[in-house]
Image (tube, rainbow, N blue to C red):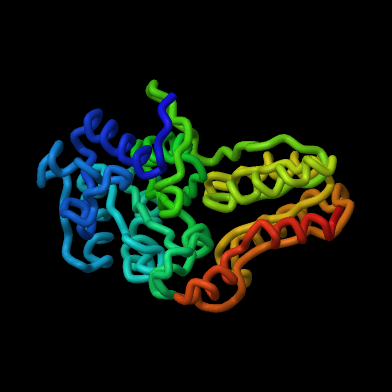
Amino acid sequence: MNQLGMGQAVNQALREEMMRDSGVFIAGEGIGVGIMESPMLPTFGLLKDFGPERVKDTPVSEAAIAGLAVGAAAAGLRPVVEILFSPFFTLASDMIVNHAAKLRYLSGGKSTFPLVVRIKNASGHGAGCQHSHNLEAWAAHCPGLKVVMPSTPADAKGLLKSAIRDDNPVIFIENMALYFQPGPVPDEEYLTPIGKAEIKRQGKDVTVVAWSNMVGLALRAADQFSQEGVEVEIVDVRTLAPLDKETILASVRKTGRLVVIHEANRTGGFAGEISAIVMEEALASLKAPLRRVTGPDIPVPASPPLESFYIPNEENLISAIREII
């Protein structure tokens, strides 16, 4: 095991897949220039090692980047393109939603369209609402797109390698704060399956479902409850689409209580989908009403105190758990 940040783990995955398959290339705004020359960031050193034919700096046009990916995938390559911030997905969504997500379906499954769109989530950095809006529920709503949101460096590496090898378009969302939080990453070759959740902590009293940076927050809250004799089970979904509902339902049937936490705002957030699944398929197991812990229905503020208010914290989660136990 090596201790790596998520950015370093993503870098390893990109490097290994580019070495394994000459059809893999990366493209995006500034991925080969100085702003990315930190060893903690995902594309560090790749331009030097693979050259400008496979590490493509693009114009500042998310629509063009997405169009490049769709065309390259249709031509038989495996592009991995980068959208700098989550809200910029809206600028690329025509090509991704109306073309990438539908082309394999329209071919009757005869064609493959392997592409990965890496997107950075940036709440908590004072970047303002145009750079910080979390749109994973938008992407998961689109049939034909797989949506991946890892919480650990090891999962980021294994899931990205699986995404690059997948024959369908994958939206791979990375939380920038996790780039600098080290975690163990296996030395040997491995793949993490898309569509399989993981129990990050076993418990018997309440289930907390989370993804991305909210998993670490949930684990810290669970540590506090364990001192009181309350055991919280943490389910890291890892991929929103396809969603491993079996693991979620099995946990809820065991504990009888559910809290879903995510950083995105509440209305239309993916917590609502998970809540609906549990109500439809495990209502009889619930001992108390479920709870959602989310961001409020406002644009993400740039002011640090207001942004801190926006992002769910341990106190919010602990309060929700106490309500139902």
Work out which residue is located at the far left of the displayed protein and give it: 52
Residue 232, above or below 308: above
Q: Is residue 108 visible?
A: no
Q: Residue at x 56, y 78 (%)?
A: 298
Q: Does 245 sit left or right of 281 as displayed?
A: left
Q: Give x and y (percent) for residue 35.
A: 22, 56
Which quadrant: the N terminus? Answer: top left
Q: Is residue 317 visible?
A: yes
Q: Residue at x 71, y 42 (%)?
A: 223
Q: Does 105 sit left or right of 277 as displayed?
A: left
Work out which residue is located at the far top of the displayed protein and give it: 188
Q: Residue at x 41, y 54 (%)?
A: 176
Q: Give x and y (percent) for residue 101.
A: 40, 56
Q: Give x and y (percent) for residue 113.
A: 32, 47
Residue 159, above or below 325: above
Q: Give x and y (percent) for residue 42.
A: 31, 45
184 or 57: nearer the viewer? 184
Q: Residue at x 17, y 47 (%)?
A: 55
Residue 142, above or below 186: below
56 or 152: nearer the viewer? 152
Total numbered badges shown on the rendered structure: 0
Residue 311, above or below 241: below
Q: Quadrant of residue 161?
A: top left
